Each structure stands twice: as structure tokens, then as C-alpha cells.
Image (tube, grey):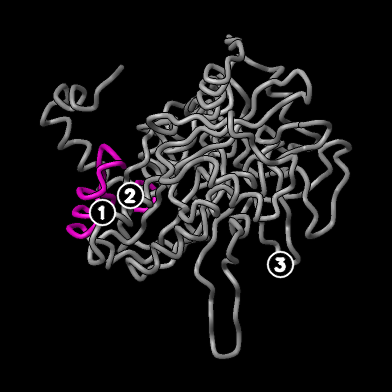
Amino acid sequence: MVMFEDVAKSISRPAKILCLLAARLLPLFALRRWLLPREVKLDSLATVIFSSGSTGTPKGVMLSHRNIVSNIEGIQQAINVSRQDCILGILPFFHSFGFTVALWLPAVSGFGVAYHVSPLEAKKIGELCRKYRVTLLVATPTFCWAYVRQCAREDFASVRLTIVGAEKMKPQLAQAFQEKFGREMYEGYGCTELSPVVAVGTPSYVAPDQTQLGYKPGTVGHPIPGVAARIVSPETFEDLGPNREGMLLVKGANVMMGYLGEPERTRQVMWEDGWYITGDIARLDDDGFITITDRVSRFSKIAGEMVPHLQVEDALQKALGTFEPRLVVTSVPDEQKGERLVVLHTELGLEVEELLARLRDSGLPRLWMPRKENFFQIAAIPELGSGKLDLKRVKDVAKQLAAVPVVHSG
């Protein structure tokens, strides 16, 4: 591990002065010849970022300079950045969103960034935003719930754009954020293999004679410039028309070089002509907005029927009367039906019997109803450092609590 602080101490004062003068006086082409090794090209490996591992073993994602720069250029155009902006840097650099959006986007674009070591310290983050007049807030829904509860309205008075990603945004969070801070919240979408941003919602452009929608509630916006998206059948890969759910494929200069040392896994996620298979179920509407409906990995096949975990979670949260994250739905093997649903939850505030009674009144299909004995209270919902659900840990905990043998891979 190399610490920037240690490297900085090793650089002499004359060397610092020489570099400052070179940066101020030399033209860009001369700086490139001086600073960059000749073997470094746009398509050379720039970094290896490990995927979150939320559904299994993390994979080393190889990203080139072209991958990262193309993604930055698309983001710049989509959210219309300027040198007067200041972004809040709270996402960890080992996470692709933090790496591209919080580290390299401000560095390449030339605007300010205010860093804080922990996205969970809501009050300190509020103070930081107020002190440095942050204009761009990029976070996860989980982190933003804490800001709604603990930050003051004036903390985010300078914020012009708030974007959340890494997990699905509940409309109730957007409403609570707007009521507390007077600011709209938009949703984006991406993944490590795509450097990472694919799509983002933005404020609509409204003029006296023209309106261009930038966002529709429930969607993740349009693909950013330079990125193409299509929806295909998960079984046949046949193109599907607008407003039909299927597998989301993405193509562009942001598509990774491949997985480190795993050519076979790379082939499994790359379709013909450079299309990346995201593993997400989505639909494209007539206006080109993307709606992510679920992940292939977040379905269970119960008695021959595919049951979506997210829809069951939404029904449970609605029955609770709160949309702050208190539970997660997963599944474990079942000898009779193939799989059965398990609900891990923190303190619910009511008995499970009452929750199930409310759920029955909601019209949820009977097959989708978790059984009382498959509810388990835990101290905290497992999360990764990025704020995403740790779905692998969730499933392991569910198997332990439901007395199902856990088989560890790798």
C-alpha cells in the first residue's frame, strides 16, 4: 500500500517548483511527452477496481484510460458541470462511483471537491456542504435517509443537483428529501464494468417554446452521451420493443476491458458486437427513459413461478407504513417448492402476525407471501462499504437462521 502522505514527503522543494513551472508554462503536448510513459495509450490499463461482490465473489474489473475518460465526458455533458461547481466526495475510491465521480470527475473538469472519510457521519457532512457550498451531491439512498433525519435544511441550500445510485431509490425518499431540503432528488444507474455511469436523471429543460424532459419518476433517466442501451429477451436475446421488460444490454467506450485473469467470466458477460450483459431486468419507454425493475439474481423460482424479491420488499415496507430500510427479502432452498422466501429485519414496531395480515389485504399473490416462521430479526441489515446491500452476506445469514447448510464458494 502506498500512502500519498509518504510520497509527498519524499518530493523535494525544487522538484515541486519545477513541476509547478512546467504545468504553468509548457504546452499540453510537451507535458504529455514529459510525464506520460510512451507505452501508455488510451486503451492501456488504467486501474483495476473490484466489483462490490454483493451477489458473490468480487471480480477484478480492468478499466482503460478510454473507459474512464469517455465516462467522464458523458457525465460532464449530462449534468452540465462548470468550474463553479463543488462536489461532495463521500463515496469510497474502491467503489467505481467514488473512483470516477468523486475522484477523477472534479480533477479532470477543474471544479472543487469536499471530501469526508465517512458517508455515515451525517451531521459532519451537512456542515461540510454548508461550509464549502457544495453544488453536486452524489450518494446512495441509504446514506441520504440519514441526511434527511440528521441534517438541517440550510446544510444543502447550495446544492443544485442531487443524484443517488448503487441501489434503487424509493419515491418516499425523494419526497422526504424535497420536503426537508427543498431540493429534487434524481436517480442514476451504472455498474463497475461500465466505468460506471450508464444513465442519469437530470432537471428538465423548460423554455417558452420547448420542453425537454430530463427525468421521469421511477426511471434512472436517459443513457449519458456516448452510451447505448437495448432491451432483449433473457432467453433468446431477441430485441424487445418499447415498454417491454427484458435484459438490459449496454454498449459504448465505457465497457470494461474484461475481468482480471478470468477470460471465461469475461466471455459470459459480453455479447456479440461489444454489448455488455448487465444482469439487470429493465424496460425502455417511448422517450428513451430506462426503468430498472429487478436483477436476475433477485428472483426466486418457487413452485415453478418467478417471484421478484424487490416487489415483495416494497409490499412489506408499504404494510409497515415506513420506507426507511428495515428489511430485506432473500430466499433459501426448499425441498418441496425449490425455494422459499426469507425476511431479515431490524425492529419492525409491530408483530409479524399483524404485518402479514396487512400484507394479505394488499393483494399480494399468495405464492409471494413469506411465512411467519421465515421472518428473522437481526441487529442490522448487511451492507457493503459503498452503501449497497451485501446480498451474499444476506443470503448466508438467511441460510444460517433458517437452518440451511451454507456452501462457501472460492
Mark toward the viewer: 3 or 1: 1
- For the residue marked with disc 1, what is the amino acid? Gln
For disc 3, the marked residue is 287
Neighbour tally class for label 1: few under 14, some 14-19, many 20 plus, Cα within 10 Å: some
Question: As rendered, which of 311 and 79 lies closer to the eye?
Answer: 311
Instruction: Please tell me in which quadrant of the rendered image residue 396 appears.
Output: top right
Mark toward the viewer: 3 or 2: 2
- Dot 2: element: helix
The residue shown at (70%, 35%) is 299
Q: CA distance from mark 3 to mark 1?
A: 37 Å
Question: As rendered, which of 148 and 221 lies closer to the eye?
Answer: 148
- For the residue marked with disc 2, what is the amino acid? Ala
The residue shown at (17%, 58%) is 131
The residue shown at (45%, 31%) is 377
Residue 118 is at least partly visible in this image: yes
Neighbour tally class for label 2: few under 14, some 14-19, many 20 plus, Cα within 10 Å: some
Of mark 3 and mark 1, the one earlier in the sequence is 1
Q: CA distance from mark 1 to mark 2?
A: 6 Å
Magenta highlight range:
107-132
- For the residue marked with disc 3, what is the amino acid? Asp
Looking at the image, residue 130 lies above or below residue 259: below
Q: CA distance from mark 3 to mark 2?
A: 34 Å
For disc 1, the marked residue is 150
Looking at the image, residue 348 lies above or below residue 201: above
Neighbour tally class for label 3: few under 14, some 14-19, many 20 plus, Cα within 10 Å: few
Of mark 3 and mark 2, the one earlier in the sequence is 2
- Dot 1: element: helix
Is the C-beta separation of discs 3 and 1 under 8 Å?
Answer: no
- Dot 3: element: loop
Residue 86: % across, % down: 30, 57
Is the C-beta separation of discs 3 and 2 under 8 Å?
Answer: no
